[in-house]
Image: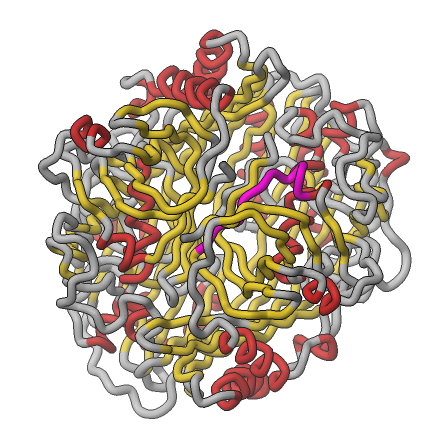
Amino acid sequence: MSPANQHEEIAAQIVRMALERGATGAEATAAEGDEFEAGVRLGELETLKEAGSRAAGLRVLFGRCVGSAYSSDLTGEGLGRMVDSAVGLARISTEDPFAGLPDPSSLGSLPGDLRLYSDSVELLETAFKIDLARAAERAALNADPRIDNSEGGSFGSHSGWRAFANSRGFLGSYRTSSCSLSTVPVVTNGGARQRDYWHTSARALEGLESADYVGRMAAARVLRRIGARKAATQNVPVVFEPRAARSLVGHIFSATAGESIWQKASFLAGRLGETIAAPGVTIVDDATMPGLFGTSPFDDEGVPPRRTTVIDKGVLSSYLLNSYSARKLGLATTGNASRGVTGNAFTGHGNMYMMPGTTDPAAIVAGVKNGLLVTELLGSGVNIVNGDYSRGAAGLWIENGEIAWPVHEITIAGNLRRMFAQVEAVGSDLEFRGSLACPTLLIGEMTISGQ
Amino acid sequence: MAFSESFFPSRFGIATSDLDRWLAQALSRGGDYADLYFEYVETTSLSLDESIVKSATQGVSLGLGVRVISGERSGYAYCGDFSPEKIDKAARTAACIAAGPASLVRTSLDESPKLDLYPVPVPAAASTLAERVALILEADQAARAADSRVFQVSAGFSDSIKHILIATSDGGLVWDRQPMARLNVTVLARAADGRVESGYQGGGGRAGLDHFTSQGLARRYACEAVRQALVQLDAGEAPAGEMTVVLGPGWPGILLHEAVGHGLEADFNRKQVSAFSGRVGQQVASPLCTVVDDGAMAGRRGSLNVDDEGTPSRQNVLIENGILRGYLQDRLSSRLLGAGRTGNGRRESYQHMPLPRMTNTYLLPGQSDPSEIIGSVKSGLYCATFGGGQVDITSGNFVFSATESYLIEGGRLTRPVRGATLIGNGPDAMQRVTMVGNDLKLDEGVGICGKEGQSVPVGVGIPTVKLDGITVGGRA
């Protein structure tokens, strides 16, 4: 294949250089990106950032020995040094019987326009972008007199290229764009402060929620936190609203990612085909959905992505694999290779989500007699090896099916095994606000620790 | 060393006249201050799994950031190479933030003072790849030999050398070479009943490879990781609810980082959005607590000869006998608040604007013997090791997750319990400190602190400390 643009040219050139130095296989990524960010606070422009950068990385194979290198110096000399580094590392590396490139028959690219790039983002005037940030913050500040401060409003945008080539003949590239708008209002109430935020992002400007909506949503979220206090220590049903629930899908990703499986560092390792969740739980990974953040025409090893059902009505039906973990496990790659410009390809997710149920989210809350609606999670207390789960939380207490009062400074604890088995309701409100998504969820019982 | 012999002039031919020109361009549309930040980083990372080197990577990252400050506004632009055209363009882009006549008279560049905290004679980056591989192989073998229940070992070694050069419109000119090295060991152990648990130990600092080899750290970290995994195999459920918590010395100092440190970063306080805003001079912690942030410690992970704005590091007292003394400042906040600079302006890389950040944050030792502290607790929890933490600086609510803890019953450590998250509110939790040990220990050098999408290496430290009435997020 001949290079379609300068990015492909660089990636192909790196692969050629590696082969010239005696590598038996090579793969290279070349990436370029431009970023813009405007930050406004209390109506005044505070920060403006604008820049671009490039980098490239490669992995070489000498038989079953691997070395990798990256550089942001893309001059001929810089690329030469980078290839020499990778070759030097492969020489000292130990032989790994599973090292290799994907099978040639598995390489390829999704056809058609995946709507990952829109020039609407690049064509925006700086003044317009600053005004959007200002408008979002203003909408939050104007929503209620109790909102007396702000961490600001911000608008950001990115556009970039990514090209990939390997010595088995794959050469491809794609262009992406994104933009985002957010604001963080603050309220002070009796000496106590609370903040919350709302954030919208999309690949094209048309996909963003309006500045007014962003401001009003952020305001509504911070206002409902006023007067938050601890809850008593007890075991109760817990409802996760979508913004908090998506992290649970993220834990399923970590627990089904190839590395965790072959290392046996996951509570789901070796459980393929077993029932591991309630029948209402179906989790899918799909990097083929046009316009979304988890979509790409090929994965970071040149394999076309696909739709993989990870949990099918409660049954663990697939792991998520790159070619290395697939070879380790004697399975086929699922097109989930992911790497930055640097280092080896690990496993990544595409658009990973829980299939929506039929219950209205309001009806889920209405069905809880005494419990917690989680709106925010804090900290990293999740152990994928054994499934232990204990995180800081904030949210709203539910009494007799109604939101009663705001809660904070508590923890919620359980074990992911039991939590997924106890999913008693899945909301109808699936929405993609990033590459992980989950509707409102009700988990039968968790331990709240507070007073 | 003369400027002309330092890294950037000798490697890339950058002269003071170039720096002058770019600073002038940055201020061409007005502004109060401008700076240039040059960065060149070489990194090597090796990792071992199943006793095989599965990943070996070397990389180079270089670039320049230009910043212009005008009142409360900051303009920032960067470029990924040192070609004069790209730097010119970045300087002009950053200049766009400023409007109006330049308000300052620029002084000529003059070398600024800095410390010499990490004079690594042979930086890790100069040692051979084979020596590094030998280190992680030693860790792998030590862990496998330590106990037959160990079935999976991952060991990694990563080191880097970062060169920086900072030129400021008020005449500052400073450069530094910043080494960093880190060794990590993670193990999985399986009990006879099939239960699997993990253990982890890592560490490092601004040091060379001999920091690890001369102290036998590969073996020590491996054995410690195995010990932790085996303790977990025997652990029961952690309790839930408010109770007395004793933190062991060292890495549990993450309490200070989350409960106090972030809330004292000047940007949040300038904006009045921190739980500590407007509280300088007030009692915000128990009188037993004196908390310092100290970037000027030799060779530690959070140490800096100069911060990323060219300010020399020093020890800053944040809380003295429970009274809030001051905030962590960068240039922007110190100017807007009329406070002195503290050497806490840090950034992840040339692609980022500096922010007020912590360096090495610790609690000064107290009077109590650690055994006396544990002996004073009828019923509670002892936390020896933690994973990560997080704070909501506005409300002050923070969490941090224990990875090794024990019940305290009748003044003695009894059963190990599984990971639990501790939650508290910064100013409130620090008032609950009722005993401080005489055994201050700094962590092994593993801290990574995240803020506004930027990661920087930090250190923490704490003596054994007793807190009355902290919420423990277990299940029992």
The picture quadrant where one finds residue B149 is top right
Tell me if residue A94 comes above or below residue A222 in the rendering.
above
Tell me if residue B467 comes above or below residue B345 in the rendering.
above
Question: What kind of secondary structure does the magenta stretch mostly adopt?
Answer: strand
Question: What colouring does the structure picture have?
Answer: secondary structure
Q: Residue at x 48, y 50 (%)?
A: A411
Tell me if residue B457 comes above or below residue B318 in the rendering.
above
Examine the structure image and report whether residue A94 is included in the region drawn in magenta.
Answer: no
The picture quadrant where one finds residue A442 is bottom right
Expressed as whole percent of the image width and height from the top left, the position of residue B379 reads 31, 34
Number of marks in the rendered image? 0
Expressed as whole percent of the image width and height from the top left, the position of residue B441 reads 22, 33
Expressed as whole percent of the image width and height from the top left, the position of residue A395 reads 54, 63
Q: Residue at x 48, y 20 (%)?
A: B234
Q: Nearer the viewer, residue B379 or B36?
A: B379
**Range of the magenta residues?**
A410-419
Residue A370 in view (yes/no): yes
Image side of residue B416 versus residue A445, left or right = left
Residue A6 in view (yes/no): no
Examine the structure image and report whether residue A414 is included in the region drawn in magenta.
Answer: yes
Image side of residue A368 versus residue A132, left or right = right
Expressed as whole percent of the image width and height from the top left, the position of residue B161 reads 37, 40
Image side of residue B464 versus residue A30, left or right = left
Tell me if residue A209 comes above or below residue A437 in the rendering.
below
Q: Residue at x 51, y 69 (%)?
A: A405
Image side of residue A322 versus residue A197, left or right = right
